[in-house]
Amino acid sequence: MQTTTLSTLPDRPAPALQPAIGIYGSAGRMGRAIVDAIEAAGATLAGGVDAGEDPAPLAGIADVLVDFSTASAIEAHLAAARAAGTGIVIGTTGLSPHHQSLIDDAAADIAVLQTGNTSLGVTLLGILVRDAAARLGPDWDIEIVEMHHRHKVDAPSGTALLLGEAAAKGRGTSLLELRVDSRAGLVGARSEGTIGFASLRGGSVIGDHSVIFAGEGERIELNHRGDDRSIFARGAVRAAVWLAGQPAGRYRMGDVLGL
C-alpha cells in the first residue's frame, strides 16, 4: 500500500469506530511499517507527511497523529498538533531536554504519548525492570546493553534509556543521577548504585535489549529481542487508537496497557 502524501490528503474522514491516523515520517522504515499496521488493523489512514512538507494540514484532518520522523522536526509537529487540537504519539528518539520541555508544554493542550519504544513487550519489560530494581538493593549492579542496525544514529537507544529510567524509578531516584554511558581507559572501580549503558551497532539488527542485575555470585538478566519492525508499528497503532479518546495530558505506553 502506498503512503498518502500531502498532495492527496482527503477531507477529514467521517466519524468511525477507528480514528483516522496521520503519520509524520511516513516515508521512513517505521512510517511504512505503520501504514501496513493501520491497514492490517482495519483502521483509517488520514495521510502522511515527510521532510519539507507542511505538517499543519495533516494535523487538521487526522483524529490522532503518530510521529516517527526526526528530532529536528518535533517542534514543528507539536506546534501543528497543538494548533489543531490533535493528539500525538511520539516515537522519535534522540530527543533533547529542550524537546522534552516542548512535549510537556504541548501536553497542557493536547494528549501526548511519548515513548522510546512502542513495543508492547518492551512496555512490559520496563515494568519488570522497575519492580526488580525496587526489590534488589543497591549492591546489585545494573547494566543495560543494546544492539541496533548500523544505520541508527543515536546512542544509547531510546529503549535503553526507557529501561534505565524504569530502573532508576524502582530505586526512587532519577536516571540523570545514576547514568554512566561509557567506560574507557583507567576509569576506576564501578560506583555503587549507578546504571551503566553499552551500545552495539552492526548489521540489520532491529533492536536487542538486555538489563543485567549483577549481585555477588549471581545474575538476573531480563531480555527483549525485536525480530521484526512490525512489532513497533502494531504497538504504535494500538497507542494511537487509545490516545484518540484521551483528554490533554502526558501519557506513556504503560497507560495503553493499563499498567
Image (tube, helix red, strand yellow):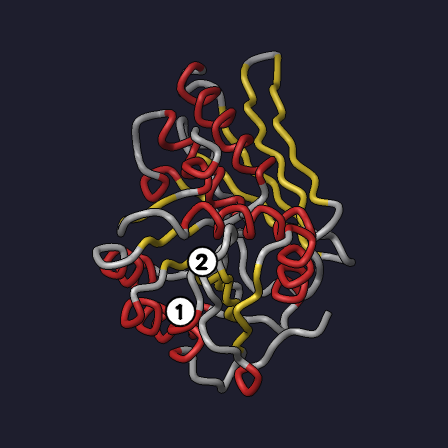
- The one nearer the camera, 106 or 65, is 65
Residue at x-position 45% and y-position 49%:
115
The residues tagged by marks 2 and 1 sit, at their Cα atoms, a distance apart of: 9 Å
Residue at x-position 38% and y-position 32%:
168
Q: Secondary structure at mark 2?
A: strand
Q: Residues within 10 Å of mark 1 (few under 14, many from 20)?
A: many
Which quarter shows the C terminus? top left
Q: Secondary structure at mark 1?
A: helix
Q: Is residue 11 visible?
A: yes
In the rendered structure, are the residues bearing label 2 and label 1 in contact, judged by CB atoms less than 8 Å apart?
A: yes
Residue at x-position 32% and y-position 40%:
177
> Which of the 4 image quarters holds residue 79?
bottom left
Q: Which residue is mark 2?
A: 90
**Residue closest to the far right:** 203
Amino acid at circle 2: Ile
Q: Is residue 47 above or below residue 185?
A: below
